[in-house]
Amino acid sequence: MALAETLGEPSFRARQLFHALYRQRIAALEDISTLPKSLRARLISQGYCMGFPAIDQRFVSVDGTVRYLVRFSDGQSVETVWMPDGDGVEETEELLPGDARGTDSRISINPPNRRATICISSQSGCAVNCKFCMTALLGLQRNLTAGEIVGQVLLVFNDHRIEIGRDRINLVFMGQGEPFLNYDNFIRAAQLLTMGAGIPESRMTVSTSGIVPRIVSFGREPLRPHLAISLNASSDQLRERIMPINRKWNLEAIMEAARSFPLRSRERLTFEYVLLSEVNDAPENARELAALLLGIRAKVNLIALNPGPEIQFQTPSPAAVNSFQQILIAAGIPAYLRRPRGLDIYAACGQLKRTTSLVSLG
């Protein structure tokens, strides 16, 4: 609206421009046919431009996952991941025996054409320094703008010819970076994706390593995606070893924020737990985790470590993973095992490090 006013144009011109960029996904001002040629020429002559990030490289997994190396105008890059068939936090978790959640009896009369999840980066690199994550090895390069966050989604939409309203797309802010350390831009991006691109907040999930003040702020937002908290340990001593940020916001502070978090009807908080062999995967760890979550309307996503050449931890055995899961279920906590996607192209959880030469993961 401000741009239209500055140019002396009626307010509906701003709506046309907004629709062209976010809904029609037009990448160049000169191609917006709904705007008069004279207005397009004025915008271009005054230095206005629009467009999407560039795809530097595209890696395709045997399971259909696509990892994009996305470059911005300053040469900085991040990774964005497309996972077909809805293999994200909210979509592909199998219901396990003993899960006491209510079933959803809604039936889709007109089923969507495609279901997929897009994993979005919010920062280039990351400052949180989780010891099991390859992104931590980059350090923090910079925050992404709201436009750069949204641009990743629009780029993937165009690459896969997504039709909003027919295709069912989930967005997860779980790529490079800690979204709550780039909070204002993340919130603005979520708003633009909802109002502009037509993605409802119920189809978005944001993951945080436990930035407690922002968890509190997030609970007050009028537009709020689902929340996932990356926990990964059952005690402060263990969490500090693998997630140094725990020294600033420990488990007591995180759990207090979680208990106070305002949930919608039927909504649950998601807690993510990366299982590391002989580090945090023992039955005692599972029992301690169940005690931590007591009284919280929660579910747990278990992630067996996705290996990387510079990560010192090992992937736990299937038996250890199953035992951990069953202890949580027996305690009345819905627990799911996240199926890794894109392991062969370094696209799985914890593997995003702008890798351009692929080696066997064994």
Image (cartoon, rainbow, N blue to C red):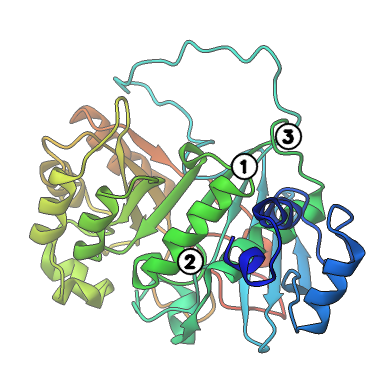
SS state under label 1: loop
**Mark 1 residue type:** Gly
Q: Position of residue 221 (x, y in %)?
A: 31, 50
How packed mark 3 is, by other alpha carbons closer than 10 Å (few <14, some 14-19, many 20 or more), is some
Out of 331 and 52, give the one closest to the viewer: 52
> Which image quadrant is residue 287 in?
top left
**Is the residue marked by circle 1 packed among few (<14), some (14-19), or many (20+) residues within 10 Å?**
some
Q: Vertical placement of 217 versus 225: above or below?
A: below
- Give the residue at mark 3: 114
Quadrant location of the N terminus in the rendered image: bottom right
What residue do we see at 69% from left, 73% from top? 70
Report, in whole angstroms, how far the alpha carbon at label 2 lies from the one at label 3: 26 Å
- The residue that label 2 is drawn on is 350
Q: Quadrant of the C terminus?
A: bottom right
Name the front one of labels 3 and 1. Answer: 1
Q: Are marks 2 and 3 in contact (CB under 8 Å)?
A: no
The alpha-carbon separation of the residues under discs 1 and 2 comes to 28 Å
Given residues 188 and 103, the one toward you in this image is 188
What is the secondary structure assignment of the residue under circle 3?
A: loop
Residue tagged 1: 198
Amino acid tagged 3 = Arg
How far from the left and from the top, in percent, is residue 28? 83, 68
Disc nearer the start of the sequence (1/2):
1
Disc 2, SS: loop
Q: Residue at 21% of width from left, 40% of height from top?
A: 262
- Asked whether residue 270 is in view, the answer is yes
User: Mark 2: which amino acid?
Assistant: Gly
